[in-house]
Amino acid sequence: MGIDVGARTLHCARLDAGGAVLNRAVLRAEDLDALTRWCAGAAAVAIDAPEAASTAPHSNDAGLAPKFRNARCAEIDLGRRHRSWVSWVAPSGPPFPAWMETGFRAFAALRARGRSQLLEVYPHACFRELAGGRRLARKQTAAGRHARTELLAGAGVRLDGLGALSHDDLDALVAALTALDAVRGGARRVTCGHDGSAIWLPGRRSTS
């Protein structure tokens, strides 16, 4: 299962063990009962949002840009080792962006009901890893959506009409692919380890 989180909606996608898209849905962000029902039976669920607020373990790290000194270990390690710096940093306390609040609630609801393995993902970094580290056009552009569609297809995701999906749907699918890779044992946990946070990346694939 992969979930792309927005302030008002949750774009969801589910893959079978072979990478075929079983179903997709758009749920209201506040309908957590629908979300937990939709995730029932999934071996792993990857959510495109921070799992928790930051405890600022690197607040005194002068080697970081000021923006990232309040970041979590997952966000810092993703930038330093994988060159994918998040466009946001999880704050230490409220007010939180509305989409981030949605993500917190989604993690909490699924955890409370014992749903599967829960992973945090950052789709931009997932796609960049699938692309072998190269930069991609912005996901809001036709070129960006096409590049992401090609990367998903190359990674084994199968769906008729894949190229017609929105960037939110594509983000949900790359999250689902990362969850599937976690089940297969190939996904990679990114963190420097001081605070328990982690962002997951899909398994490495040949880019030839």
Image: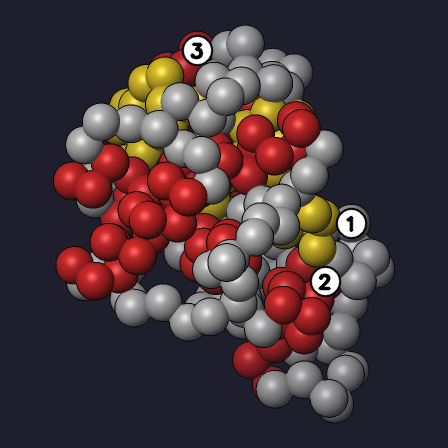
In the rendered view, does 64 fall on the left or right side of 167? right
- Residue 124: x and y in percent read 44, 58
Q: What residue type is disc 2 on?
A: Cys
Q: Earlier in the sequence, mark 3 or mark 1?
A: 3
**Residue 37's disc number:** 3
**Residue 46's disc number:** none
Residue found at x 42% / y 43%: 154
Q: Earlier in the sequence, mark 2 or mark 3?
A: 3
Q: Given contact means CB atoms under 8 Å apart, are the residues at marks 1 and 2 in contact?
A: yes
Q: Nearer the viewer, residue 59 or 150?
A: 150
Residue at which label 2 appears: 73
In the rendered view, does 206 fall on the left or right side of 57? left
Q: Residues within 10 Å of mark 2 (few under 14, many from 20)?
A: many
In the rendered view, does 28 fall on the left or right side of 126? left
Residue found at x 40% / y 33%: 157
**Residue 196's disc number:** 1
Work out how far the residue at label 2 is from the one at label 3, CA to CA, in angstroms: 31 Å
Work out how far the residue at label 3 is from the one at label 1, CA to CA, in angstroms: 28 Å
Residue found at x 46% / y 70%: 134
Say above or below: 105 vs 81. Answer: above
- Residue 87: x and y in percent read 45, 69
The type of colouring in the image is secondary structure
Q: What residue type is disc 3 on?
A: Arg
Q: How many marks?
A: 3
